[in-house]
Image (cartoon, rainbow, N blue to C red):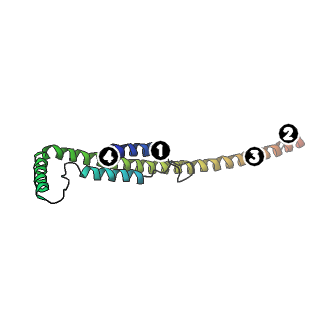
Amino acid sequence: MKAREVANGMQRQALRPAESTNITGALPVLDLRPFKSHVSQLVEIEKTVGVVNPRPPGLLNNLIQSAKKQMQRGLAWYTRPLKQFHSAVIDAILAEAESRKLMEASINLQLNDLSRRSGQQLENISKLEEALERLGQQLERLEKTIDRTGGHP
């Protein structure tokens, strides 16, 4: 698999909506398995940069391998920074994925807290409505008493 195909697969995975949620009203669960699979494929591809591929034994193949190894040593100045760059890119991708996972957890905690507090507020509103209803009933009784007694309670 070529690096471009892996990158395209990662992009498709990132753009695809998640199918499940972990709690009611929470953000979709971030599934990093396909992402990590793509990253491990990138790691394998990165290992092949500047590597001499093996050839079967034989005098001609040994000469070819020797020439390829000399070229590899001669191009090390070029391939070493490429390998360092590729490793840094992979590390950055993994760090970004971990950051997303942590942000998702933080947001879900905040949503849970908000939901809990909203429930408490609804309970408080219900209690206030009940208290208001009782006060209204007491007021009605007081008005009736005032009407019966002619203005004196």
Query: With 59 as the anchor, is 49 left or right in this view?
Result: right
What's the distance in space between the residues labelled 4 and 2, CA to CA? 94 Å
Helix, strand or loop at mark 1: loop
Residue placed most toward the observer, 149 or 111: 111
Q: Amino acid at mark 1?
A: Arg
* Residue located beneath label 4 in the image: 2
Question: Residue 39's spot in the image, x, y percent?
Answer: 34, 51
* Residue located beneath label 1 in the image: 16
Q: Residue furthest bottom?
A: 57
Helix, strand or loop at mark 2: loop
* Residue located beneath label 2 in the image: 151
Q: Residues within 10 Å of mark 3 (few under 14, many from 20)?
A: few
Query: Are the residues tagged 3 and 1 within 8 Å (C-beta)?
Result: no
* Residue located beneath label 3 in the image: 133
Q: Amino acid at mark 2?
A: Gly
What's the distance in space between the residues labelled 1 and 2, CA to CA? 74 Å
Helix, strand or loop at mark 3: helix
Residue sitting at x 45%, y 52%: 31
Q: Which numbered disc flags the more N-terminal residue, 3 or 1? A: 1
